[in-house]
Amino acid sequence: MIEPHRLAALLLATVPMAWPALAAAQTSPRSASGAYDAKDWKTCARLYGEQAERTPPVRGAAYDAACCLALAGDVEGAFARLQRTPSEQLPEALADDPDLAALHGDPRWQALLVRYRADNEASATNLDTALLEELTRRVDRDQEVRNRSFQGPQGELAIQEAMAVDRDNTAWLKRYLEEHGWPPHAKVGRKGSQGFWLLAQHADADPRFQEQVLEMLGDAVARGEASGVHLAYLSDRVRLAQGRPQRYGTQFERVDGTLRPRPIEDADTVDARRAALGMETLDEYAARMEDAYAADSQD
């Protein structure tokens, strides 16, 4: 199941480091990912399926729906989803994803893996492995310090450590982008492109640089070389730093115990903007965040 891992990364990328601990009350899950965590496979499959059937679809929803269908015992439904999903939207861990174990004895499973591996090999011909190794090391360090901070008290030492990691990553990212520009998928793949975005998302200490990256990222999205979802997150980050309302509702805050989006420009049309970039509705996103925080608070 790809969604919980993607959700964890996005939350770490989005939530300010200085938030206080959140209150605990767990309610019935309202989101697809919440239903997954609650092992309500039919609800999970239905909610992700609804997202996958939209025009345009919510990115990643088809695969997540297939996982929930497999867990619910609907082998035919799971294969139908997977066979319609382009290989570039399937995760690297496809072959080993335990959520799809119910499919492994079916001949269609091996055919699916053959297609996936052939497509991956064709797209990986020109990947810059040295660059990806360096990028992976930096992203792992970024997530390590944030995970450690979220798991314990956010003392001054933890905050200073995270800031030091961000400064080092920002300096490296700035040097690379000034020399090479935004890397195409042929060079770093979609996972590598996400890593570049993540480092830019955490370059808050250099707002002018974030603005430059946003322009660069917008051009890359227009060429099909970067994710529109990443553009939405960085756009909102930059606008809020400028004292302007966000456009996509990716940035939330806790007010009087309630999680809500920070101010949004033209809020009545935010779902149309989100849909154009392959994102779920704002209500679905808010429910996902509420379910995630409720679950985390019980750990």
Image (tube, helix red, strand yellow):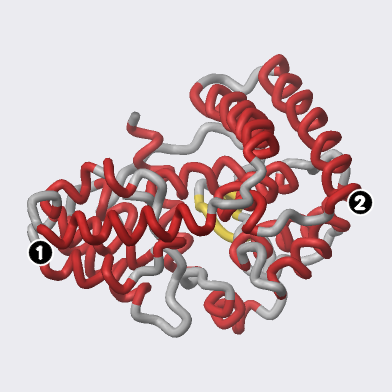
Q: Residue at x 55, y 58 (%)?
A: 260
**Element type at mark 2:** helix
User: Residue drawn 69% across and 47% down?
Assistant: 196
Q: Which of the pair 172/125 is nearer the observer? A: 125
At 32% across and 61% down in the image, what residue appears?
Answer: 115
Residue type at numbered disc 1: Asp
Q: Is residue 31 visible?
A: no
Rendering quarter of residue 183:
bottom right
Residue at x 84% of width, y 59% of height: 243
Relative to residue 110, is residue 15 depicted above or below? Answer: above
Judge the density around disc 2: few (<14), some (14-19), many (≥20) Cα neighbours within 10 Å: few
The local secondary structure at tag 1 comes to: loop
What is the x, y in percent for residue 102?
Answer: 11, 51
Judge from the rendering whether residue 40 lies leftward or rightward of residue 229; answer left or right.
left
Q: Nearer the viewer, residue 49 or 263?
A: 49
Q: Nearer the viewer, residue 138 or 184?
A: 184
Q: Which of these two is toward me, 276 or 258?
A: 276
User: Could you say which disc has been placed on residue 74 in the image?
Assistant: 1
Position of residue 100 measured from the top left corner of the image (x, y, whole percent): 20, 50
Reply above or below: 267 against 100. below
Determine whether 93 is above or below 120 in the image.
above
Q: Are marks 1 and 2 in contact (CB under 8 Å)?
A: no
Label placed on residue 66: none
> Label 1, label 2: how many angstroms apart (C-alpha)?
50 Å
Left or right for 36, reference 69: right
- How many residues crowd mark 1 within 10 Å: few (<14), some (14–19), many (20+)? some
Circle 2 residue: 208
User: Do we see residue 40 in this rendering?
Assistant: yes
Q: Position of residue 95 (x, y in %)?
A: 28, 46
